[in-house]
Image (cartoon, coloured by chain):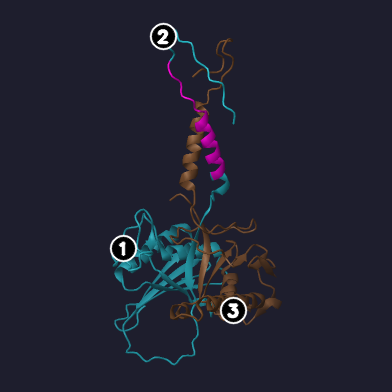
Amino acid sequence: MSHGKKKRKRTSSAGSPPPELNVMPFIDIFSMLTTFLLVSASFMGMGILEVQIPFLSNSPEVKEEPQRSFSLKVDIEPANIIVTHQWTAAPVEKTELRFELNDADIAKFHTEMIAIRNKVPENDKVDLRADDAVEYEKFIKVLDSIKTLTETDPPLTVPPSKDPEKAPKKGRGSYLFEKVVIGSVLL
Amino acid sequence: MASVGGDSEEGLSLNVMPMLDIFSILVTFLLMSYSSDPTQHDVDGNLELPESVTIAQMDEVPAISVTRTDILVNNKSLVKLENGKVPQADINQGAINPIYKALVEIAETNKAAVKELTGALSEEKKSKPPQITIEMDKKHNFELMRRIMLSGQQAEFLTFKLLTSKPTID
């Protein structure tokens, strides 16, 4: 970019003209910076949703004392989401909730998942099953509702994660249920 | 500063202040949306990622890409989809045979690379299940994802990272 010839304005008043700022170097720097940023910027951010699948093991079964644990299962059908939770020992307290597979009900489903997490803070695992006909986009929406707590959601009353990477950060979301196992893969 | 249309003795001069304003706004916007992620990945034009508000960042380039027409492993097309479904000839025990074979190769290459680097597999590496990143077009059905995951499971991949798109400005 060429620099223009400096000009001095004539002033109506007597004496020397006021000093004038040469903005051309600013424009040069801005042009270079804009070009560099436009070339190197990526406008679409990418994230990942981590899921596990069950595996079959040949190792001998370890016999442990049966403990009362919480089981949370989410089934995605072409038109519905079914949430089933229960305790493995008495009192079982089995509950089944049904939501429609649309944006409004997915929001309600997310609120219910937050309530379940707060009710049983020691459980951070969900067994997710999906029907073959479910669209991948909808599957990701439900998975997102299970895994991620956004900054607009009420904070959880669970103890914070020991892993600093997984601890909630200011202005960002955190994990709602960190472990999601897709059980329907092996069925 | 003089503006266009000054008297004839001075000639024409351009008022650059509006241009400076535009540049300032543009630079501010670009700096705000600038991504400093070390991993950069260009998504295929034939693939539209589903949206997600996930907090986890992409940390590796996806090995498996499922576009509207193909399944690619490391940018090599292995399966041609027929109306979004895997041809019956490529299915074996519910899994996709060419994908399973390619994933077995990747798993073996990864194991050999780790052995070469560390001499022997450390306890941490042994206990950590191998992972793989998948990107898939949002219009496909879960059946296709299930078959890919089953192929991965047979090749000893138990953790899957599903690539999604998200807004860059939080």
Magenta span contains residue B161: no
> Residues at marks 2 and 3, common chain?
no
Measured as percent of width and height from the top left, residue A155 is found at 31, 60
Chain identifier of the residue bearing label 3 in the image = B
Magenta span contains residue A24: yes
Residue under label 1: A156
Whole-Å distance between the Cαs marked 2 and 3? 84 Å
Measured as percent of width and height from the top left, residue B35 is found at 49, 52
Q: Residues within 10 Å of mark 2 (few under 14, many from 20)?
A: few
Q: Which amino acid lies under the numbered mark 3 shown in the image of this protein?
A: Glu
Which chain can be seen in brown? B
Q: Residue at x 44, y 13 (%)?
A: A17
Q: Which amino acid lies under the numbered mark 1 shown in the image of this protein?
A: Leu
What colour denotes chain A? cyan
Q: Residue at x 59, y 31 (%)?
A: A1
A42 or A160: which is nearer to us?
A: A42
Residue under label 2: A15
| Side (left or right) of A15 relative to B116 | left
Residue under label 3: B108
Measured as percent of width and height from the top left, residue A181 is found at 46, 74
Q: Which amino acid lies under the numbered mark 2 shown in the image of this protein?
A: Gly
> Residues at marks 2 and 1, common chain?
yes
Q: Residue at x 55, y 57 (%)?
A: B40
